[in-house]
Image (tube, grey):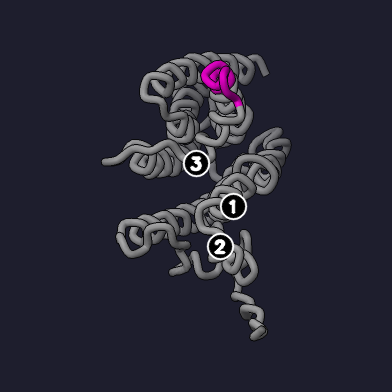
Amino acid sequence: MSDAWALLAAGAALTIVTMAVVWAIAVRIANAGIVDVAWSCNFSLLAVVYAALGSGWLPRRLLMAGMVALWSLRLGSYLYQRVMGDHPVEDGRYQQLRKDWAPRANARFFWFFELQGALNVILSLPALVACLNPEPALDVLEIGGALVWAVALAGESVADHQLKIFRALPANRGRTCQVGLWRYSRHPNYFFEWLIWVAFFLFAAASPGGWLTFYCPLLMLYFLFRVTGIPATEAQALRSRGEEYREYQRTTSAFVPWFRKAAPARMDP
């Protein structure tokens, strides 16, 4: 237990400092969207700390750290290209927060950044638990978790790539992506992102006390549906795309990829 608390404290200290530095950069470049990049990449830092300092079976530590790092750095690099690409523009969600929080936006963003860091630590517990497990063999739950992780990572990568290709075409500027996975879900990236957390929970559940991390996929689901995920994204989409996006909402599943509904018939006046 003391090992777990020591690792948790080390991870928390690292995250607090990292987010403070990232906030200072965000103030300098006037782009709070960089917090999304930092939030993603922080999981890699925490996983490396837990794997390096944990006392569990080395192959398990390496596997868990590798899974977290591959997912974290892929997502972080994708978000970095969106946030800090050739023509960096602050995401509409953060522009709206900047307006809502004026004139103390930068101060409020500091605590917002640190809150994201706290979530990093809270959500990193599956990795911590796994890195303390001394059992010298992989459990069926760990193998299952790794398989779910592979499917989720592939799905999220495909969804992000399809959206990137769609947005790169000038003819699609201001339009809603409805190709590939985006034809069957308004947020396939969020669905597969949530599935990643299901995979981490399954992997951790094979370790002593790991079942307690069931809150991770539940918490992610809550944030995706009630806080910073779908609500903020769709509010911005409605502001920028209007009726086209409302039609997309009427015909397309919000989360789980599924068959589309027929568009309601229009009555001539």
* Residue 189 against residue 39 in the figure, above or below: below
Q: Residue at x 56, y 30 (%)?
A: 99
Residue 3 visible in the shown view: yes
Residue farthest along the bottom direction in this orientation: 268
Q: Which residue is mark 2?
A: 245
Q: Are marks 1 and 2 in contact (CB under 8 Å)?
A: yes
Residue 69 visible in the shown view: no
The quarter in which the N terminus is drawn is top right
Of 14 and 51, the residue lying toward us:
14
Q: Can you tell which mark lies on residue 234?
A: 1
Determine whether, in the image, residue 117 is placed left or right of residue 159. right
Secondary structure category for the residue under label 1: helix
- Please say whether residue 107 is one of the residues in the magenta stretch: yes
**Disc 1 residue type (three-letter):** Glu
Circle 2 packing at 10 Å, graded few (<14), some (14-19), many (20+), is some
Residue farthest along the left direction in this orientation: 86
Label 1 or label 2, whichever comes before in sequence order: 1
Q: Residue at x 31, y 57 (%)?
A: 168
Q: Residue at x 55, y 69 (%)?
A: 184
Q: Residue at x 62, y 62 (%)?
A: 256
**Separation of disc 3 and disc 2 at Cα?**
16 Å
- The residue range painted magenta reads 101-110
- Please say whether residue 129 is one of the residues in the magenta stretch: no
Q: Position of residue 224 (x, y in %)?
A: 63, 46
Q: Which residue is mark 3?
A: 92
Secondary structure category for the residue under label 2: helix
Image quadrant where residue 132 sits: top right
Label 3 or label 2, whichever comes before in sequence order: 3
